[in-house]
Amino acid sequence: MGISFWIRRFCFVSCLAFGGIALGQLLQRHSASDAFAHAALWAPLSALVFTVARLYQSRKGQRCDICQDTPE
């Protein structure tokens, strides 16, 4: 798994996190601008934590059944 894999993984997780966080904020009746600002702040941070954790686990040879990736 090269650097492009991890960049794509980060972007994918960041997009999913953005949608989930924004939706959660909107369901709590926050304004759309506040919800998107909150999601724009927390989505990249969440994706970074997830991606770094998966990179660490991958280097240790641990497989992720949810992600369906196998370390090289």
Image (cartoon, grey):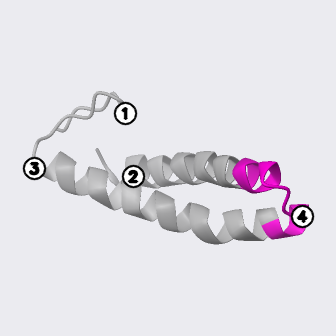
Q: CA distance from mark 1 to mark 4?
A: 33 Å
In the depicted structure, whether residue 45 falls above or below residue 5:
below
Which region of the structure is painted magenta? 22-34
Q: CA distance from mark 4 to mark 3?
A: 43 Å
N-terminal of the pair, mark 4 or mark 3, is: 4
Q: CA distance from mark 1 to mark 2?
A: 12 Å
Measuring from the top left, give residue 23's x and y in whole percent.
75, 48
Identified by mark 1, the residue type is Cys
N-terminal of the pair, mark 1 or mark 3, is: 3
Label annotation for residue 60: 3
Q: Which residue is mark 4?
A: 31
Q: Is residue 32 found inside the magenta-colored segment of the image?
A: yes
Dot 4 falls on a residue whose secondary structure is loop
Measuring from the top left, give residue 52's x and y in whole percent.
32, 61
Q: Is residue 68 found inside the magenta-colored segment of the image?
A: no
Left-right relation of 8 to 54:
right
Q: Residue at x 59, y 51 (%)?
A: 17
Q: Residue at x 79, y 63 (%)?
A: 35
Dot 3 falls on a residue whose secondary structure is loop
N-terminal of the pair, mark 2 or mark 4, is: 2
